[in-house]
Image (cartoon, helix red, strand yellow):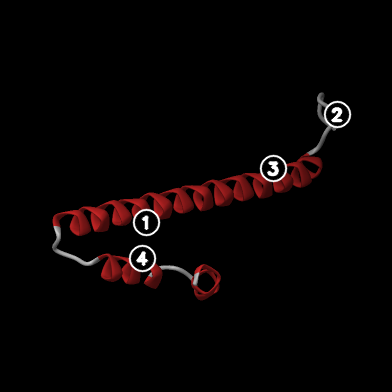
Amino acid sequence: MNDIGMNAGDLIPIIAIGGGMLVAIVAISFGVMQKIMETKAREATKRELAAYVAEGSMTPEDAEAIIKSDMPSWKRRSQS
């Protein structure tokens, strides 16, 4: 036994739990970042479509169809 009072076998569960928590935190962080990037891209698309409608190169109906094509089907049904 060493001076600390712990042997190497006692550290394995601590390292395993710490590693698992680190993997979970990284996975959650990347999931949040992905959702933020998707939302920003969707909003940029809406702004671009609004600009096209404002300048007259696209009809509002066409812009609406493009926006709805990106939505999941359950959201489209609830907005109709």
Label 3 – label 4 distance at C-alpha:
43 Å
Residue 33, compared with residue 56, is above or below; it is above
**Which mark is on residue 18?**
3
Q: Residue at x 19, y 58 (%)?
A: 52
**Which mark is on residue 42?**
1
The residue mark sitting in front, 2 or 4, is 4
Q: Would residue 80 appear left or right of 55 to someone viewing this image?
A: right
Q: Quadrant of the N terminus?
A: top right
Mark 4 is surrounded, within 10 Å at the Cα level, by few (under 14), some (14 to 19) or many (20 or more) other residues, namely some
Tell which of 2 and 17 is nearer to you.
17
Mark 4 or mark 1, which is nearer the start of the sequence? 1
Q: Are marks 3 and 1 in contact (CB under 8 Å)?
A: no
**Which mark is on residue 5?**
2
Q: Amino acid at mark 2?
A: Gly
Tell which of 56 and 34 is nearer to you.
56
The residue mark sitting in front, 2 or 3, is 3
**Which mark is on residue 13?**
none
Say what secondary structure mark 4 lies in: helix
Instruction: Give percent across and percent down for residue 16.
Output: 71, 48
Mark 4 or mark 3, which is nearer the start of the sequence? 3
Q: Amino acid at mark 4?
A: Ile
Instruction: Give percent across and percent down for residue 7.
Output: 81, 37
Instruction: Give percent across and percent down for residue 8.
Output: 76, 41
Mark 3 or mark 2, which is nearer the start of the sequence? 2
The residue mark sitting in front, 2 or 1, is 1
Q: Amino acid at mark 3?
A: Gly
Q: Would residue 66 appear left or right of 17 to someone viewing this image?
A: left
Q: Would residue 58 appear left or right of 79 to someone viewing this image?
A: left
Mark 4 or mark 2, which is nearer the start of the sequence? 2
Label 2 – label 3 distance at C-alpha:
21 Å
Q: Amino acid at mark 1?
A: Arg
Say what secondary structure mark 2 lies in: loop
